[in-house]
Every structure is written in C-alpha cells, then in structure tokens.
C-alpha cells in the first residue's frame, strides 16, 4: 500500500454503469479509497470522476495509461467491456497494480491463462468479480 494513508489506493478503469456501482460501494470500504478514474478518453474520465466528487474529492482522472502510471494507485477495478479485459489487466499487472476485473477475465481460455500467468509472474493479486443486480 502507499504510504499516504492506511487505505489501499484504488483506481477504476472504465466510466460506465458497473464502475459506478463499484464506486457507490467503495465509501464503505475500511481498507480502500479511490485515487483515480481512467477511461479511453480523459474528458470522459473527468466527467465520471466528478459524479463521485462528494465521496472522493481528490480523485484524479485521465486515460488508462495516465492512471496506471500513478504511484498512489495500488489496485485497479476493471469495469470495461469484456473485450478490453485482457489488455487492461496485463497493463495494470505490468504497472505493479493488483487487479479486480469483472467477468469474464479473458474472452477465451488462452487469454485467461495469459492473465493468470502475468499475475503469478508479477506476484500480484488478481481476482475476477461477478456483478449481481440488487435483490438477487
């Protein structure tokens, strides 16, 4: 974890609905806080981050590369379309970030194996989430 706080610094990659669900839950986390929001387009990331400014007033925003380069980000939540999960997971792991990626981790077994091997090689945590609608 970073030395700025006792909470892990999270970044969210993806400025869509499922990432919003993650950010609405994050304020209740005892051990994590939002540091940055990334999207393909920095302007979209900024607008999305602004929607959560009440809970995370100091969160930065930028492109995926901008966010992954930050030293105050320990872990990333990937809530993008599934066809980008491989690329973003591998980039995050290469940047030294733990990864929580929505399902599917890869679009086929070979992609999934590649991501698992990258996490093992980097010695970093990797988890795949499964979003469930409320009330289920």
Image (cartoon, grey):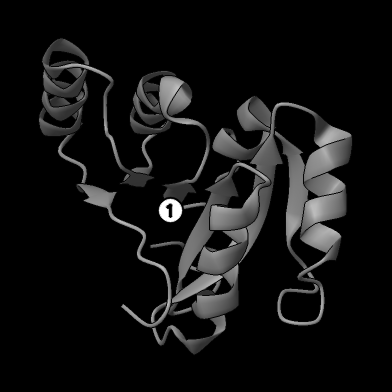
Residue drawn at the location 43% of the way across and 80% of the way down: 6
Q: Position of residue 99 (x, y in %)?
A: 33, 45
Nearer the observer, 104 or 5 = 104
Does residue 78 lie above or below 19 as drawn? above
Check the picture and name the quadrant holding the C terminus. bottom left
* Residue 72 appears in the rendering: no
Does residue 116 lie above or below 5 as drawn? above
* Residue 3 appears in the rendering: yes
Q: In this view, does 84 lie to the left or right of 16?
A: left
Give SS at disc 1.
Answer: loop
Categorize mark 1 by other alpha carbons within 10 Å: few (<14), some (14-19), many (20+): many
Check the picture and name the quadrant holding the N terminus. bottom left
Q: Position of residue 31 (x, y in %)?
A: 39, 80
Does residue 32 lie above or below 90 as drawn? below
Residue drawn at the location 36% of the way across and 46% of the way down: 102
Q: Is residue 1 left or right of residue 44?
A: left
- Mark 1 highlights which residue? 74
């Amino acid at each position: 974890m970073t030395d700025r706080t006792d909470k892990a610094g999270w970044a969210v990659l993806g400025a869509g609905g499922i990432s919003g669900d993650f950010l609405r839950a994050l304020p209740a986390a005892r051990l994590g806080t939002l540091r940055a929001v990334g999207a393909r387009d920095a302007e979209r990331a900024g607008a999305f981050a602004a929607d959560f400014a009440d809970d995370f007033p100091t969160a930065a925003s930028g492109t995926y590369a901008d966010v992954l380069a930050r030293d105050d980000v320990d872990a990333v939540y990937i809530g993008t379309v599934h066809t980008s999960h491989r690329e973003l997971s591998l980039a995050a792991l290469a940047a030294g970030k733990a990864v929580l990626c929505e399902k599917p981790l890869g679009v086929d077994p070979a992609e999934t194996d590649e991501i698992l091997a990258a996490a093992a090689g980097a010695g970093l945590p990797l988890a795949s989430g499964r979003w469930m609608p409320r009330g289920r």
